[in-house]
Every structure is written in structure tokens, then in C-alpha cells.
């Protein structure tokens, strides 16, 4: 179950990665016309509407993206089937359709059905479509029906499946919707404390990839909170909308990079150069884009105490920002790019105070991280117990990777794949935004030292046959090179 949820989290990253485009368009639009929200400038209105075309259709993106991401060979027919599944269920369970089915006036239909077109239903449609693709994409029908065999059968089976699921949801959706709303309301009624609880669990669920499910409740329109949609759609309350986003900016732009500096300063002298390159790249990525996984995975398993402190500080940051009503928003993550774009948004409230808060949190992060690392001799990057022969492997890998810029990713991919056991041991390779996700036959065959010697931030063994290699934001290029190696074999 956990493995499947991790795959779902990975699949969600494809549609989520589209959101920065909306943030850029709408951010520039609001920057041009922060008071009129586009009414005072045709150019601003054009950009805002272009961005809202993405934000307003997140359920469609989830239906297509999840179906594609969970299908066994990432085929376009799976994506089409996700769209078909979503259209079937949202049409059958629309307010007017339910009124007809139940023989009542549309105004008497449960309000839950007016919210059937949401991110949750989008995800469910994508999941169903992926299951249908994995099961029926190779099925051969009798000669008379041969035209509908294989991949053409998948949309049909997805539609049939959603007919059945729609009947179930006709009774279950009001209950599910009420539960989600009650959960969201319970947290939202806690105000700033609720935002802090959310921030804490957001980080604690990151290692197993389940934070996306939690994010969906607060960021999208599943439980009526829709913090991202309301912020960029300018349909919320100034100083309140954005409270589940704003507190991440001080952490991702300032806190974590300061923690990276502490880890560099506490590294062993002879490994400082290696740690410096890792921490500089990871810290800069966190500051500029809000992509923190390369940095967090560098210490979350090596020093879990430190990661727990990081999660607590994240929750504290959200509490502070929410308590003082300092708000800003993001389309992808809480980095400088999103901060600049959202700072002139009509619902952004005293966003400059998030920078002040970030500077304070930078001092807290650096002080706490440095104290804990030295006090408890934590095994952060550059402080690991040296393994015999590791330096030689590192030197060889570095030499190979330095042959030319063109061969950098090829060399890294070759070393990582060899460390995983090659064709004889690797059964599947996939990737998300920053991680390679690999399934192997025998974990004992994996040479973690060989993989680490390529300079990757970390390795995460998530199951007896599942391992993740944290590469960074350039993971796609490494994954492509590994695919070339596998196909050549």
C-alpha cells in the first residue's frame, strides 16, 4: 500500500509541475495591475486569464497526469482514458443529473455534488484509468471486435468502470465530502496553530512521499480550503488566504540554506570541498525555486533528529506567519521566484515581513543545526564514517564525470546503474522531480558506496526491493541516460 501511495505521489508531480506556468502568468498580471486585478489593463487581464485557465482546471490535470504517471509504460492512451473517466463521473454526478436520478428539484440536491469536479475526483479518475490501462492494453478481442482491442479498449473500460464507481459515489460522495470538510474545518478553526500542525506533518510525510495527499486537502479545492486556487484567483480574504503557503517561504528561502551552511561548517576538513558543492547547489535550489528535496534527503535519514527539528521549525514558521497575517502564495513551491511574483498580488499581505522572519529563522536554523550536529555527533554529509575504498571510487567517478560537460550525466548514470546491479538486478527505473525510483530483485546486490561516490545527495531504501537515489533537479537527464543503458542492453 505504501509503495502504491508513493507511486501516486510521484505521478502527481507531473500535473503539479504545470502550476508554475500559471503562477508566472498570473503573478506578472497582478504585478502590472495589482489594484484592478486586470480590469485596468488589457495586458494584465490577458495574463491573469491565461494563468487561471490552468489553476481552474486542476482536476483535469490530475486525471490526465495521474493516469499517465501510473500507467506501466506511460502511454498517451492512458492519459486519454483518465480524461474519459473524469468526464463520465463528473457528468453523471453533476447537480442536474443527480436531481434527475433522484427525482428531486436541483436546489434540493446535496451540496456535495456541486463540488464533484475537484482534485480528489481527478486523482480517482486517473487511478482507475491507469488500472484499466495496465490490465487491458494488451487484451486481444475476437475478430469481430478486433478494432477495439488493446489500447483502444482502455478508454471504453475506463468509462464502464466509472459508471460503476459513479453509482457508489452517488451514496458515498456526500459522506466523503463531509468528512473532508470536517477535517479541513477542524484544522482551519485552529487558526495559526492549525497552520502549524499542517506544516509539521507536511515535512514529516515527505520521506515517504505522502505529503502530496495532505497538501491536496489544504492547497486545492477538496475540503473547501483551496488555498492556492483562492489566492491566485483572488477569491479569498487578505491576510488569511495564503496562510497554508506563506510560512514555507522563510524556511525554504532562508532556514534550510542556513542549515546547509551549518552542515558545511561542521563537515570534516578533508571533505569540506565535496560537501560545499552539494550544499551550495542544494541551498541555492531551495532559495531560488523552493525545491528542497536534494537538501532534506541529504540529512533526513542520516540524522533523523535533525529532520525532526526541521519539521518542528517548519510548523513554527507557519504559525508565526499565520498569526501575524503575513501572506504570500506560490504556484509550485516557496522559493524566490514565486515570492517575487506573488508579492504584488492583491491578497499578499505584508509579504516583506516574511523576509524579516526568514532572516530570523536563518539564525535559528544555523544555530540549532550546528549545536545538534556537534553535540550529538550527527552523521550529516561530510561527517560519515569512512568506508575503505570509498575515496578511490569517488576519485574514479569524479574523473570520469569530468571528461566533458556532455558526458557528465552519462557518466553519473553509468556509475549509479552499475551500483544498482545493472540489468541483472534492476527491474524498473522511474523518477520524480528530484529522485530516481528504482525497483530491484535483490537489495543485497546494491552497492550504496558506489552510488554515493557519484556525488548524489543521498539514498533512501524504502522497501525490500525499492530504493530511491536523490539526484537533484537534473534527475530527468540522469534517468534518460539510464534508459539508454537499459535499452541498449
Image: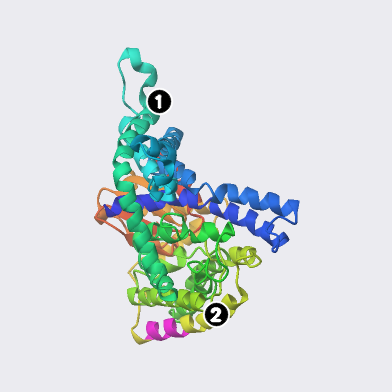
Q: Is 172 colored magenta in this rendering? A: no
Image: 39 above or below 129: below
Q: Which residues are magenta?
A: 367-374
Image: 219 above or below 18: below
Give me the residue at 53% from left, 83% from top: 360
Q: How is the image coloured?
A: rainbow
Give me the residue at 34% from left, 56% from top: 178
Drawn side of residue 425 relative to residue 345, left or right: left
**Which secondary structure dominates the residues rendered in magenta?**
helix
Q: Which residue is mark 2?
A: 357
Image quarter where the C terminus lies is top left
Q: Which residue is mark 1?
A: 152
Residue 29's image quarter? bottom right
Q: Nearer the viewer, residue 331 or 298?
A: 331
Local crowd size for mark 1, using a 10 Å CA cut-off: few (<14), some (14–19), many (≥20): some
Local crowd size for mark 2, using a 10 Å CA cut-off: few (<14), some (14–19), many (≥20): many
Q: x, y (%) of residue 251?
A: 49, 73
Q: x, y (%) of residue 428?
A: 34, 45
Query: Alpha-carbon distance for marks 2 and 1?
Result: 55 Å
Give me the residue at 69% from left, 52% from top: 45
**SS at badge 1:** helix
Q: x, y (%) of residue 481?
A: 47, 46
Amino acid at each position: 500500500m505504501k509503495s502504491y501511495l508513493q507511486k501516486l505521489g510521484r505521478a502527481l508531480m507531473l500535473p503539479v509541475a504545470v502550476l508554475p506556468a500559471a503562477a508566472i502568468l498570473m503573478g506578472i498580471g497582478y504585478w502590472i495591475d495589482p489594484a484592478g486585478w486586470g480590469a485596468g489593463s488589457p495586458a494584465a487581464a490577458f495574463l491573469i486569464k491565461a494563468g487561471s485557465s490552468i489553476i481552474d482546471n486542476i482536476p483535469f490535470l490530475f486525471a490526465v497526469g495521474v493516469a499517465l504517471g501510473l500507467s506501466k509504460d506511460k502511454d498517451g492512451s492512458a492519459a486519454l482514458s483518465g480524461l474519459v473517466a473524469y468526464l463520465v463521473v463528473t457528468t453523471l454526478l453533476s447537480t442536474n443529473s443527480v436531481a434527475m436520478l433522484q427525482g428531486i428539484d436541483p436546489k434540493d440536491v446535496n451540496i456535495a455534488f456541486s463540488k464533484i469536479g475537484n482534485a480528489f475526483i481527478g486523482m480517482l479518475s486517473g487511478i482507475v484509468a491507469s488500472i484499466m490501462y495496465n490490465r487491458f492494453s494488451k487484451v486481444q478481442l475476437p475478430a469481430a471486435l478486433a478494432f477495439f482491442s488493446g489500447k483502444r479498449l482502455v478508454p471504453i473500460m475506463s468509462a464502464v468502470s466509472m459508471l460503476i464507481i459513479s453509482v457508489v459515489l452517488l451514496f458515498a460522495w456526500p459522506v466523503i465530502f463531509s468528512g473532508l470538510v470536517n477535517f479541513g474545518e477542524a484544522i482551519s478553526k485552529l487558526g495559526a496553530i492549525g497552520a502549524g500542525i499542517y506544516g509539521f506533518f507536511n515535512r514529516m510525510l515527505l520521506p515517504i512521499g505522502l505529503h502530496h495527499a495532505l497538501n491536496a486537502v489544504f492547497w486545492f479545492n477538496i475540503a473547501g480550503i483551496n488555498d492556492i486556487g483562492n489566492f491566485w484567483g483572488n477569491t479569498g480574504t487578505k491576510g488569511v488566504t495564503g496562510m497554508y503557503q506563506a510560512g514555507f517561504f522563510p524556511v525554504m528561502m532562508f532556514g534550510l540554506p542556513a542549515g546547509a551552511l551549518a552542515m558545511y561548517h561542521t563537515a570534516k576538513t578533508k571533505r569540506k570541498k565535496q560537501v560545499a558543492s552539494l550544499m551550495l547547489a542544494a541551498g541555492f535550489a531551495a532559495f531560488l525555486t523552493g525545491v528542497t528535496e536534494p537538501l532534506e534527503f541529504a540529512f533526513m535519514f542520516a540524522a533523523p533528529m535533525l529532520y525532526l527539528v526541521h519539521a518542528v521549525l517548519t510548523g513554527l514558521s507557519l504559525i508565526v506567519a499565520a498569526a501575524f497575517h503575513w501572506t504570500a502564495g506560490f504556484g509550485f513551491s516557496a522559493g524566490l521566484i514565486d515570492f517575487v511574483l506573488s508579492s504584488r498580488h492583491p491578497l499578499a499581505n505584508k509579504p516583506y515581513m516574511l523576509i524579516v522572519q526568514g532572516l530570523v529563522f536563518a539564525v535559528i536554523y544555523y544555530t540549532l543545526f550546528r549545536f545538534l550536529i556537534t553535540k550529538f555527533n550527527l552523521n550529516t554529509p561530510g561527517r560519515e564514517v569512512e568506508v575503505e575504498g570509498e575515496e578511490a571510487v569517488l576519485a574514479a567517478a569524479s574523473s570520469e564525470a569530468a571528461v566533458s560537460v556532455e558526458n557528465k550525466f552519462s557518466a553519473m548514470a553509468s556509475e549509479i546503474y552499475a551500483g544498482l546491479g545493472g540489468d541483472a538486478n534492476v527491474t524498473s527505473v522511474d523518477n520524480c522531480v528530484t529522485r530516481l525510483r528504482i525497483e530491484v530483485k535483490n537489495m543485497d546486490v546494491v552497492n550504496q558506496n558506489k552510488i554515493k561516490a557519484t556525488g548524489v545527495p543521498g539514498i533512501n531504501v524504502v522497501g525490500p526491493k525499492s530504493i530511491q537515489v536523490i539526484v537533484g533537479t537534473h534527475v530527468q537527464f540522469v534517468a534518460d541516460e539510464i534508459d539508454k543503458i537499459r535499452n541498449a542492453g
